């Protein structure tokens, strides 16, 4: 019985309304079981990335076949974010933590306030408003969807987001976690069609 | 050869009249009484081997490792008071971690060795501490080749082509001097190290031992790892077969 997690992030690092960096990755492969994605302040993400990478390295050096499970990473991240919040010095991010551990899949979200929860579908930023309903609807109709179906679903959500969010880019990357490990696909672009523009008076 | 440092050996902050710090020399004795560890720097990596004496049949053989990972590319082994050595390993790991955080990359072994030396040396300066009762061997494989260093309880460190510490170090050094390590690959060195540890192991005084080996080099892509079990077992089989062939009339040697 294979469980998998699929999810995608846009490749843009904005500087206010300027799409300043247009092919940076917001995904971090923590280990063979876990991936995290970040939105918000990129520098804070880089800081957390280094912390996690050192943590994972320290763990690997002990050679005891222990590795952090997705829920452990999630718990640790929640503690760190909440701690910083209580010191009035937050790490200004929203993280998605996903993975598969001992056949069980995990998906959680934690933000700069330290608010943390798990759900079968998650989305941050504009996605919480526009993509989440689409994801929930599809999940309710087909809770046992395959990895490919999930990827198609995510792409269609990204397309909607690119159409509707004026501060988005159409480039994205998708990470998939299965019991066999983590794969992060090559960056791609969503195909869009602006044909209906012709029906808008004054479009051209 | 034993010298008594009566009166001048009570603390590391005292010199003897002939300019020796006895506490540091006593620390060296702890190293010399421990089981043997050797390391060889070949042309494309470093191989480390340790004679782990089996103190009790109840011991689980893979616990209590004598070879530790300090960073992805650095391995360490020790002889002497193992608990002291683990403290040094812990400090060394922190150095690696802080170097990586500050400079964005893995620490060159030369720098780490300097820091470990300074750390160990610091404990030879005060009466309130005792020196570390262990010698540390550090090996790595970096972009410009393999590196091998050894740090003694006094804090002195040297770079080596091959080194040996522990009770059979003199016999091991004799064997090591017969090798030309710069011409050998890691795979060849694994056999040599296994061979030497079996030769110098004292069958009379010591019980059986487990051979623990690790390597870091081209063959591991620069990552310090334990040598695969089958390879170690293979090397041991070859060594034992060769020893049986050559043992005919020879009996155990005195040490």
Image (cartoon, rainbow, N blue to C red):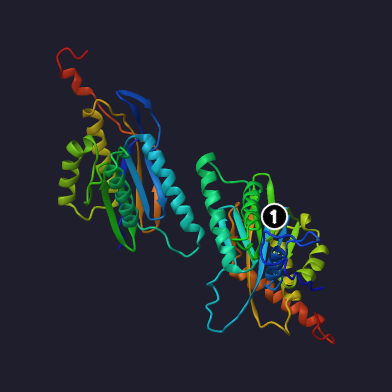
Residue occupied by mark 1? B148
- Say which residue appears at 56% left-offset and 63% top-offset: B86
Left or right: where B186 falls relative to A33: right
Residue A119, position as x, y percentages in the image: 21, 51
Residue A52, position as x, y percentages in the image: 41, 48
- Say which residue appears at 29% left-offset and 23% top-offset: A17
Q: How many marks?
A: 1
- Say which residue appears at 59% left-offset and 46% top-offset: B107
Is residue A186 in view from this perspective? no
Residue nearest the viewer, comparing A30 with B218: A30
For the C terminus of chain B, give its image quadrant: bottom right
Residue nearest the viewer, comparing A115 with B226: A115
Within 10 Å of the Cα at label 1, are there few (<14), some (14-19), or many (20+) other Cα atoms? many
Residue A166, position as x, y percentages in the image: 24, 25
Residue nearest the viewer, comparing A50 with A169: A50
Left or right: where A128 falls relative to B132: left
Residue B38, position as x, y percentages in the image: 70, 65
The vertical placement of A181 against A114, above or below, is below
Q: Chain of mark 1?
A: B
Left or right: where B29 falls relative to B175: left
């Amino acid at each position: 019985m294979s469980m998998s997690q699929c999810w995608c992030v846009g490749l843009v690092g904005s500087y206010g309304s300027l799409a300043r960096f247009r092919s940076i990755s917001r995904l971090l492969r923590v280990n063979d079981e876990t991936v995290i994605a970040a939105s918000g302040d990129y520098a804070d993400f880089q800081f957390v990335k280094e912390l996690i990478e050192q943590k994972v390295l320290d763990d690997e050096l002990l050679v005891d076949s222990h590795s952090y499970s997705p829920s452990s990473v999630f718990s640790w991240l929640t503690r760190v974010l909440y701690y910083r919040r209580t010191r009035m010095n937050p790490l200004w991010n929203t993280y998605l933590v996903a993975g598969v551990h001992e056949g069980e899949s995990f998906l959680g979200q934690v933000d700069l306030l330290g608010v943390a929860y798990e759900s079968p579908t998650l989305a941050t930023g504009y996605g919480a408003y526009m993509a989440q309903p689409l994801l929930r609807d599809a999940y309710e109709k087909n809770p046992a969807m395959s990895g490919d179906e999930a990827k198609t679903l995510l792409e269609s959500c990204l397309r909607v987001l690119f159409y509707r969010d004026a501060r988005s880019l159409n480039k994205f990357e998708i990470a998939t976690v299965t019991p066999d490990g983590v794969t992060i696909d090559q960056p791609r672009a969503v195909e869009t069609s602006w044909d209906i523009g012709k029906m808008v008076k004054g479009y051209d | 050869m034993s010298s008594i440092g009566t009166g001048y050996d009570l603390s590391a902050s005292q010199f003897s009249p002939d300019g020796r710090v006895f506490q540091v020399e006593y620390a060296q004795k702890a190293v010399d009484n421990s089981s043997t560890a050797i390391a060889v720097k070949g042309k494309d990596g470093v191989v480390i081997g340790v004679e782990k004496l089996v103190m009790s049949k109840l011991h689980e053989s893979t616990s209590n490792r004598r070879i530790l990972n300090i960073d992805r590319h650095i391995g360490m082994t020790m002889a002497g008071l193992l608990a002291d050595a683990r403290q040094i390993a812990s400090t060394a790991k922190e150095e690696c971690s802080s170097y990586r955080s500050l400079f964005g990359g893995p620490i060159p072994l030369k720098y780490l060795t300097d820091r470990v030396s300074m750390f160990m040396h610091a404990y030879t300066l005060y009466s309130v501490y005792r020196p570390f009762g262990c010698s540390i061997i550090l090996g790595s494989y970096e972009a410009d080749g393999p590196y091998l260093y050894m740090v003694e309880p006094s804090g002195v460190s040297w770079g080596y082509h091959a080194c040996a510490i522990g009770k059979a170090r003199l016999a091991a050094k004799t064997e090591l001097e017969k090798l030309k390590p710069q011409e050998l690959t890691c795979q060849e060195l694994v056999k040599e190290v296994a061979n030497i540890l079996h030769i110098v192991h004292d069958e009379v005084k010591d019980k059986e031992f487990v051979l623990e080996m690790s390597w870091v080099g081209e063959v591991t892509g620069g990552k310090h790892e334990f040598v695969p079990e089958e390879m170690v077992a293979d090397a041991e089989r070859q060594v034992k077969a060769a020893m049986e062939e050559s043992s005919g009339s020879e009996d155990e040697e005195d040490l």
